[in-house]
Amino acid sequence: MVLPLLAWVGIGVGALLGTMLAVTLSWDDILIKLQGKRLAVLGARGVGKTHLVKFLTTGSIPAEYKQTVASEKASSHRFQLKDLDLKVKEFLDVSGDKAAYSEWKDRYNEANIVFYLLRADRLIAGDRKVEARVRDDLRHIGDWLESSEKPRPRFFIIGTHCDLDAEFRSTSVDKIGDYVDKFRRLPIVTELVARGGGAQHAKVVLGSMKTVEDTEALVYQVFKQVAS
Amino acid sequence: MTGKFIFWAQALDNSSPDHFDAHGRALEPDDAVQRQQAVSCVSRVIKNGKRLFEQSGVLLTADAGHFVVEVPSAQRDSVGRIAPIVCYGEYDAAAGDAQWELALVALDDFAKRIGRNIQPEHFETARASFEALKKKSSKTKLTLVVGVCAFLILVIVYVLALKKWQTAY
């Protein structure tokens, strides 16, 4: 008499837990949790973090732009980009203010891949304010890199807004490599790469995110290196 | 009036430090610890809480005892982006409507202090977002009460069944 009652309670609890699990984790989520990469997208204000996050999680670019003050949850996403099958876990789009450094550190510590975005056009133009800011950012990131006990995440320095640089606009596709090399030789970029763990660990990628096609090309460049 | 909340807005020129006000006190740019703590409070709710409301640029996220509401200000930043103001606060599901009115008054006050203003329609949408949070809180309370009652009934049934089984054997 009692045992059947206990069995019914057990079945009830099991069914409840099962339903809760099914609601919380879809099969796709489980796959992404097993295979997907967790990203951290860091950088000062107005460098294109939200734009990149939106592209990575929806495949589109924002119709209207908004300052990112409070962080925003970006859902997990699986997509095909040319020959690449990309799986991105849920992550947070964070503020670019220095007050968010502790938040950046949390995201950095959780990530398998870290993208640090900067205004390449402003560095090329010799903007001292931008230089000071990226130097400060990389000083923090370098400290987290050294103090972390977990495996080092893949680290990418992504220079955006290259379309605002006249030289980039006039550079043909086959000469882009020379343009990137020239950028890497800028004293501030050399310093940043050194703080990011050296050329072996800190990869530099340049491009524009003006259109969906430009963004796609930039993301492809980055993930091609992630996959390699 | 502003003592219970944290307010946060990004500077419109995108280069000056963000505006912070925590528990009625403006946080200076060199007050890095307090500013980072304020950001952590907001992020904790965003990360662990649930988005309960999203309409006309007004976003409300809440966990069991805290909320974060983001309301667009009328001004745009130097590159034409929407410049929202974020308000973080504690809420008490059992307390009355006064806490929400207090939050709205404090939000308006902060916006004015940093030279911004919130358009009436966004103000009303923010009020509606608090209504959504109120509904969610009362629903949670009801679920909790029903859950506890169901558990008690199960225990009583089990005890009665056990007694019947013991008397039978």
Image (tube, coloured by chain):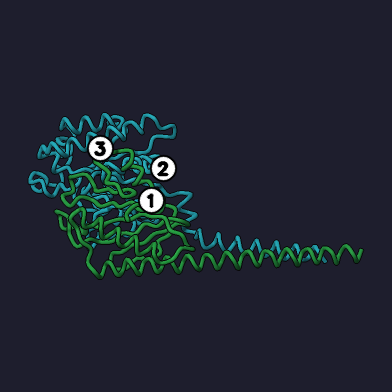
Chain colours: A cyan, B green
Q: Is residue B139 above or below residue A203?
A: below
Closer to us: A128 or A77:
A128
- The crowding category of the residue bearing disc 2, from other C-alpha atoms within 10 Å (few below 14, some 14 to 19, many at least 20), is some
Measured as percent of width and height from the top left, residue B119 is found at 22, 66
Q: CA distance from mark 1 to mark 3?
A: 29 Å
Asked if badge 1 and badge 3 are on a common chain, one would say no
Q: Quadrant of the C terminus of chain A?
A: top left
- The amino acid type of the residue labelled 3 equals Asp
- Which chain is mark 3 on? B
Residue identifier under label 1 = A91
Q: Are marks 1 and 3 in contact (CB under 8 Å)?
A: no
| Secondary structure found at label 3 | loop
- Which chain is mark 1 on? A
- The amino acid type of the residue labelled 2 equals Glu
Q: CA distance from mark 2 to mark 1?
A: 9 Å
| Secondary structure found at label 2 | helix
Q: Are marks 2 and 1 in contact (CB under 8 Å)?
A: yes
Q: Is residue A149 left or right of residue B8?
A: right
Numbered circle sitting on residue A110: 2
Q: CA distance from mark 2 to mark 3?
A: 28 Å
Q: Is residue A123 above or below residue B24?
A: above
Measured as percent of width and height from the top left, residue A42 is found at 29, 44
Numbered circle sitting on residue B113: none
- The amino acid type of the residue labelled 1 equals Phe
Asked if badge 2 and badge 1 are on a common chain, one would say yes
Which is closer to the viewer, label 1 or label 3?
3
Q: Is residue A155 visible?
A: yes
Measured as percent of width and height from the top left, residue A31 is found at 48, 54
- Which chain is mark 2 on? A
Residue identifier under label 3 = B30
The residue located at (15%, 44%) in the rendering is A174
